[in-house]
Image (cartoon, rainbow, N blue to C red):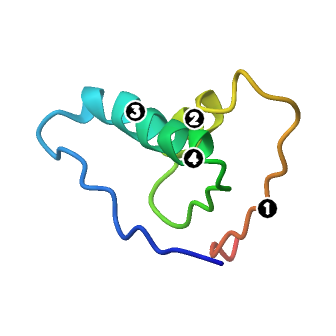
Amino acid sequence: MAVDLGDLETDTYDFAANPALIEAHIRKIRYADAIPIVLGDDDSVPIPVFAAFADSGPITVVQVDAHIA
């Protein structure tokens, strides 16, 4: 079963707080024994996503890049 949790509301005025917010939400998903699938956004998102897996074993990353060059 797949569940779409929608967009994570981040704070456009407090950019420095967003990584901790992203990491916390990914951890909540993991601790619910679910597998998070993260799609979209900019290059700052993968770092807190990976941080949420710091206490686990290897992870698999599938990257699809829309850039031509």
Q: Residue at x 72, y 70 (%)?
A: 64
How many numbered marks are there?
A: 4
Residue linked to disc 4: 32
56 sits left or right of 4 in the view: right
Marking on residue 19: 3
Locate residue 65 relative to residue 22 in the image: left or right.
right
Q: Secondary structure at mark 2?
A: helix
Residues at badges 2 and 1 in contact (C-beta under 8 Å)? Answer: no
Say which element carries label 4: loop
Residue at horizontal 47 percent and vertical 34 percent from the top: 23
Tell me the element at label 3.
helix
Marks 2 and 1, the one that precedes in the sequence: 2
Give the foreground label among 4 and 3.
Answer: 4
Q: Are marks 3 and 2 in contact (CB under 8 Å)?
A: yes
Specify the amino acid type for callout 4: Ala
- Find residue 36 and report its image quarter: bottom right
